Image (cartoon, grey):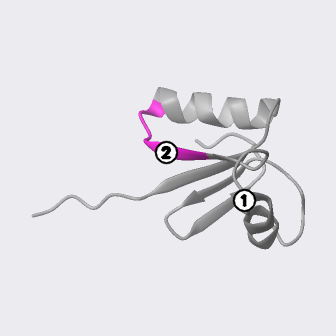
C-alpha cells in the first residue's frame, strides 16, 4: 500500500505576520510546504489574485485542492 501525500503551497509576501504564523504552525505540525513570495516570483501575484478571487491578501494556502485564504489557524 502506498502513502498518499498532499502538496501544500503557501503564497506570502515580505513582512506578512499572518504568513509567518501559518508557516510556523505548519513547521510545528511537520507539514512540508513550498513557499512562494509574491514580491520575488514573477507571475506569483497574478496567480494569488486568481486563487483569492481578486483579493490581494496573504497568505493563500493550497492543500491539495483546498484553497485557504488568509490565516485564522490551521488546526
**Dot 1: few (<14), some (14–19), or many (≥20) neighbours within 10 Å?**
some
Looking at the image, which residue sits at the far left? 1
**Dot 2: few (<14), some (14–19), or many (≥20) neighbours within 10 Å?**
some
Is residue 32 within the magenta segment?
Answer: yes
- Bounds of the magenta span? 29-35
Determine the image quadrant of residue 18.
Answer: top right
Say which residue appears at 72% left-offset and 37% top-offset: 19
Image quarter (top left, top right, bottom left or bottom right) of the C terminus: top right
For this rendering, which residue is in front, 28 or 34? Answer: 34
Upstream in sequence: badge 2 or badge 1: 2
Q: Which mark is residue 33?
A: 2
Return the x and y of residue 9 as percentages of the image width and height. 56, 53
Image quarter (top left, top right, bottom left or bottom right) of the N terminus: bottom left
Q: How many marks?
A: 2
Determine the image quadrant of residue 68.
Answer: bottom right
Return the x and y of residue 26 as percentages of the image width and height. 53, 36
Return the x and y of residue 34 as percentages of the image width and height. 52, 47
Do callouts 2 and 1 mark residues in contact (Cβ within 8 Å)?
A: no
Per the model, the C-alpha gap separating discs 2 and 1 is: 16 Å
Q: Which mark is residue 5?
A: none
Q: Secondary structure at mark 2?
A: strand
For this rendering, which residue is in front, 50 or 39? Answer: 39
Q: Secondary structure at mark 1?
A: helix
Say which residue appears at 76% left-offset and 62% top-offset: 48
Say which residue appears at 89% left-offset and 69% top-offset: 54
Q: Which mark is residue 44?
A: 1
Is residue 55 within the magenta segment?
Answer: no
Amino acid at each position: 500500500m502506498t502513502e498518499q501525500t498532499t502538496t501544500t503551497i503557501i503564497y506570502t509576501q515580505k513582512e506578512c505576520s499572518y504568513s509567518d504564523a501559518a508557516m510556523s504552525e505548519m513547521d510545528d505540525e511537520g507539514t512540508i510546504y513550498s513557499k512562494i513570495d509574491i514580491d520575488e516570483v514573477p507571475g506569483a501575484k497574478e496567480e494569488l489574485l486568481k486563487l483569492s478571487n481578486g483579493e490581494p491578501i496573504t497568505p493563500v494556502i493550497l492543500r491539495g485542492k483546498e484553497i485557504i485564504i488568509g490565516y485564522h489557524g490551521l488546526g
